[in-house]
Amino acid sequence: MTRRQLSVALVISLSLLTVSARPAAAETLTLDQCVDIALRQNATILTPGLKTGMTSAREGVWTAWGGILPSLSGGVDYDWSKTNRHVAISQDSINGGADTSITGGSSSGWRANLGIRQTLFDGLANYYTIRESRQSLIGYRQQYRSAELSLILQVKQSYYDVLRAKGLLIVDSGAVERSKKDLETIQSMFDLGSKSRSDLLKAKVRLGTAQVSLISRLNAYGVAIAALNNILNRDVSTPFELADVGAAPDLGLSYDQALKEAKDNSPLLLAARAEVEAKRSSLGIARAAYFPDLSWNAGRSYSAAERKDLFKSDNGTWGIGLSLSYTIFDGFVKKSNYSRASVSLKTTREGLTQEENNVALAVRQAFLSWQLAHDKMALADETEKSAQEDFNLAQEKYNLGAGTILELLDAQVSLTQAQTDKVNALYDYHLAVAALENSMGRGR
């Protein structure tokens, strides 16, 4: 080997030693653990707008329920008044005298009241307000769930990217080891004079190419780890090792089953349905304005000149009443509100239809990608077995002098490519499963 090749080999050996030593000092994370960490720490799911919207919608439900409950009010008043003094003198025509009277002064009084009031009928406006607020809360919850599912999919993608990078690193490491062994064999045969310098040089080039590819894989592995740390909202240099996900799962679903589950569970579709129901309730609220309002009230009031006498029974008065009101003309406000609510409902229904089509398209794309990934994974496994047999045969033929160096190198390249394709096919399949589950509204 040349000095340059020895240097490259040393760098690769040290890098591989570092990678192999990492699990001993780092934690091992499963996919579920990574998802849990991301849901707790990732800023995407902690966005203030979504949290604030959910809180406002939740409080809106309480406010809406409060509209049908009776309202209770009470108070105590104290009044004090003063008038200017006025002197009046009147002439006595009989006795010739005069009468003088003085008026004015100050007065005070205490009053207290306790009353209850409740709306009996308002055209069902309160009922529709409750429905509207509940649907609004459902919509926000589904938007939040959609953000969660999106984050879970990102975690899965990054998780599989790390495992893919590690698998490809192992493949290229194996390619380097095969190239080294072949070079050692060719070097020995060259020293004995049974192989040409051309064969030796080709073997050295092949080893150098495999080493450069391995260094590239090491870099990709480091970047994949940093990317997953970033999604987990941790320091990108935090070391960890990932648990293997095992064999690729077989969902055992037909397209119709997948589509039905998506229609039942897709958060964006459920949010769109909730919005339609909320708009329908808004239309009901606008319609309720055309009906009169009926309410009842009852109360007890007290009044006295002195505070100590305020709540004596003799100073109290009971009252009860029934009120019916209707706005005869409001400047076409009712008509305008109803028209706007009707148009808004129609637009929202059209949006729901579009969202249903979007969900159906996403499921179809994900389902077809899943089927393709499944077939490619099976084909990649057979291709890898065939390439291994071809390499073993080419190596044996070359060692016996019945094959050429080009045949051996081609077999090496084909085996490495087949192993690379197998790793890619495996994690492409896992990603396809994750994408299909996401389109169906599944989280884990």
Image (spheres, grey):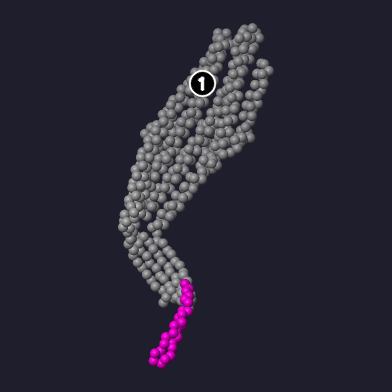
Give how far across and how far down residue 54 sits, in percent.
46, 48
Given residues 103 and 119, the one toward you in this image is 103
Give how far across and how far down residue 66 sits, in percent.
41, 57
The residue that appears at 55% across and 8% down in the rendered structure is: 402
The answer to whether residue 120 is above or below residue 253 is below
The answer to whether any part of residue 51 appears in the image is yes
- Give the farthest residue toward the right: 3
Give how far across and how far down residue 156 sits, in percent.
51, 34
The residue that appears at 54% across and 12% down in the rendered structure is: 407
Q: In the rendered structure, which amino acid carries the disc numbered 1?
A: Ala
Q: Secondary structure at mark 1?
A: helix
Given residues 91 and 356, the one toward you in this image is 91
The residue that appears at 53% across and 23% down in the rendered structure is: 420
Given residues 151 and 424, the one toward you in this image is 151
- Write down the quadrant of residue 392 in the picture: top right
The residue that appears at 40% across and 40% down in the rendered structure is: 269
Q: Is residue 2 left or right of residue 421?
A: right
The answer to whether any part of residue 29 appears in the image is no
- Residues rendered magenta in the picture: 79-104
Q: Is residue 102 magenta?
A: yes
Q: Is residue 15 magenta?
A: no
Q: Which residue is mark 1?
A: 418
The answer to whether residue 113 is above or below residue 186 is below
